[in-house]
Image (cartoon, rainbow, N blue to C red):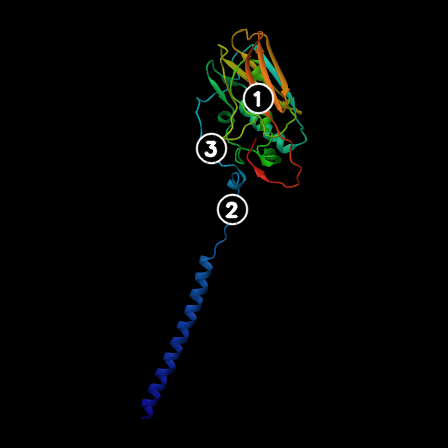
Amino acid sequence: MKKLLAVVLAAVILTAALAGCSGSADVNATADTEKTTTTTTTTTRTTEDINTTFKEASTGTVYPALNKDADGDYPYRLSTYTTYYDVKNSTRTKNIDNAVSKLDNLLIPDGSTFSFNQTVGKRTVLAGYEEAKVVEGDEFVDGLGGGICQVSSTVFQAALRANLNITVRACHSLEISYVPLGADATVQWNSQDFQFKNNSGTDIRMSITAENGTMTCSIYAKEDIDIGDVEIKVSKNGSEYVLTRTVNGEVNYTTYSKYSKAKTTTTTKKAAAR
């Protein structure tokens, strides 16, 4: 009997020991599992936040891509126009330089259409654009690509003076200062473009520079053509600004603009480039 009790007692002790080992193994396994499944998530901003941009409209007509021609011979200057900007505003200056780099030496063949948006492209962080003041409703707010509307407006004025066919143009909603009121051309990616058609009868090349606060756009032609006696005039009719282009005494282009005064506010928002 004593031997039987001794055997039973030994079996109980052995079973308890094995159960203790199993419990320790489970705890360690749980700890190891927690270590292997714990992760750290980081987010890097590689493009503009979708919440900071306006919803895109559907793309209109897509025109053939325009190429650069830095080496071609375009000896005849048709027009030139200059605007000025604050070079100390570093982000706005960078945006201007970025857009200008896409347009300088751009060849626009006879009969082709120039689209600012399709040539310059979408204004994004990856494309090198930064935040600067843009127009949103009745406020100037921070938005990607602020400053490029001065580029489009400068090109607009050069194209006007070259007697080119302006096909798409719109004014800002607020008053701006880098061109006379009624003489601007606003752009916003995929919803508001600036376009003109080369109806000159010859290939043309755009030359545009932005240095030390001075931006100049000139248009040169491959052949010696007569664009006529071009006169640009902006008049005010009530609250409306009327721009007319007269060539050899006849009006061949008219566009209308209305502006609001900017609302005084300390609120800073995000907006799409204009």
* Mark 2 surroundings within 10 Å by alpha-carbon count, few (fewer than 14), some (14 through 19), many (20 or more): few
Name the residue carrying label 1: 256
Q: Position of residue 149 (x, y in %)?
A: 58, 27
Which of the two discs, 3 and 2, labels the residue nearer the N terminus?
A: 2
Determine whether the residue tagged by mark 2 lies in a helix, strand or loop: loop
Q: Amino acid at mark 1?
A: Tyr
Q: Residue furthest bottom?
A: 1
Determine whether the residue tagged by mark 1 lies in a helix, strand or loop: strand
Residue drawn at 32 percent across, 90 percent down: 3
Determine whether the residue tagged by mark 3 lies in a helix, strand or loop: loop
Q: The N terminus is located in which quarter?
A: bottom left
Q: Position of residue 14 (x, y in %)?
A: 37, 80
Name the residue carrying label 2: 43
- Residue sitting nearer the eye, 45 or 268: 268
Name the residue carrying label 3: 57
**Total marks drawn?**
3
Determine the image quadrant of residue 150. Answer: top right
Residue drawn at 47 percent across, 19 percent down: 113
Q: Mark yes or no: residue 71 visible.
A: no
